[in-house]
Image (spheres, rainbow, N blue to C red):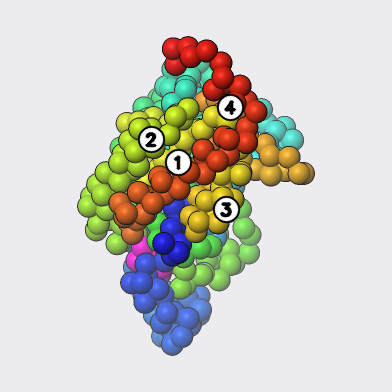
Amino acid sequence: MNAMIYLDHAATTAVRPEVLEAMIPYFKENYGNPSSIYDFASISKTAIRNARAQVASLMGAQERDIYFTGGGSEADNWAIKCSAEAYAHRGRHIITSKIEHHAVLHTCQYLERHGFSVTYLTPDEMGLITPRALRAALRPDTILVSIMTANNEIGTIEPIRELGLICRQQQILFHTDAVQALGQIPLDVDRMNVDLLSASAHKLMGPKGVGCLYIRPGVTIGPLIHGGAQERHRRAGTENVPGIVGFGKAAQLAAADMDTRTRRERELRDYFIRSVLARIPYCRLNGSPSRRLPGNVNFSFSFVEGESLLIMLDMEGICASSGSACTSGSVDPSHVLTAIGLPEEAARGSIRFTLGEDNTREEIDFVVSRLEAIISRLRSMSPAYAQRQSAPKSAE
Ligand SMILES: *Cc1c(COP(=O)(O)O)cnc(C)c1O
């Protein structure tokens, strides 16, 4: 097999052919600026309205509450920075979790440098943020809670509805980063009790560089990007019309096939997990077996460096990811795996595979057989593994 096997759909996805088809006219003949007053521009304006309805529908929102952005990171920055600014007169305390995306974590750290105090909740060993942990962290001056709908590394789906209810009862704003969840699990902003929700098109087979923020009516946050009157004065800048159209189409298609697509992904995911656990010793599944995104698989392999494993998989044409980040020459273990209590060695030996609709059982079989071979090779070079093998057998 020499074709590439792409198992990194949490990083990004290919645009669906129908999405590309829908976008092309807005690069070519329908290039009008939606803000212009002549009739030609109204084609672009109508296209945006249509896309807004498609995106709103995928999360049970009203069209008028969807604001298009330049992606998920922008939506997270906007929600958090502008809530902090708008509600600072009530208090300066924010609650989030240790396992958020860096678009949330680094924004919170920025606010800490500007007079806000932030509590970073520790998840349980499955990656769950419990309602109890949230309740215990609330303060009279808490103005905002931001907890992701589903985690991008370990796939854990958070009890958003319960967390949102606590915030609602205390009249505290509740934001959720739903970038990984949109199009993967059913979402409804009312049922979830959220006031602000971030999404991004390229994680659901739409284009890169476009996303949105849902803002509940009555939430008075101002714009992050100042300038023109676009997006009802809340997000300046000439609209990315082809991108927005692509996001709309991707949302419509994701809604239409969510049941069948995610059922297939779940089956393939569980097959992958069973195969690896059965064939590769000293291995554990990270995250929750049940409250898990349909396409997410995350393993820790003892006596192996995740980075070495990734490089060797890449040589076989297999694209996967490790949560760790290379900073200044050293590899830092993932903040998510550290937060769920994995020892550093296990966090370093971990790897994430995220499935998409085109992956097959044959691909998974190939990946598992390559994993088995590569891990056994890497372990044969590990002094710690040799020591373990020669030690008297103890109960695992
Ligand atoms: C990808 C991702 C983002 C960032 O979205 P972009 O559109 O790439 O800026 C934010 N949060 C989560 C959970 C993500 O997976």
Q: Are marks 2 and 1 in contact (CB under 8 Å)?
A: yes
- The image position of residue 326, as x and y in percent, is 69, 44
For the magenta stretch, what is the residue range? 245-250
Residue hosting label 1 = 372
Which-is-in-front pick, marks 4 and 3? 4
Q: Are marks 4 and 3 in contact (CB under 8 Å)?
A: no
Disc 3 C-beta below 8 A from ligand 1: yes
Q: Is residue 393 left or right of residue 383?
A: left
Residue hosting label 4 = 385
Q: Amino acid at mark 3?
A: Glu
Cα separation between marks 4 and 3: 44 Å
Determine the residue positioned at 41% across, 82% down.
25
Cα separation between marks 2 and 1: 7 Å
Task: Determine the image quadrant of residue 48.
Answer: bottom left
Q: Is residue 78 visible?
A: no
- The image position of residue 282, as x and y in percent, is 47, 27
Cα separation between marks 3 and 2: 42 Å
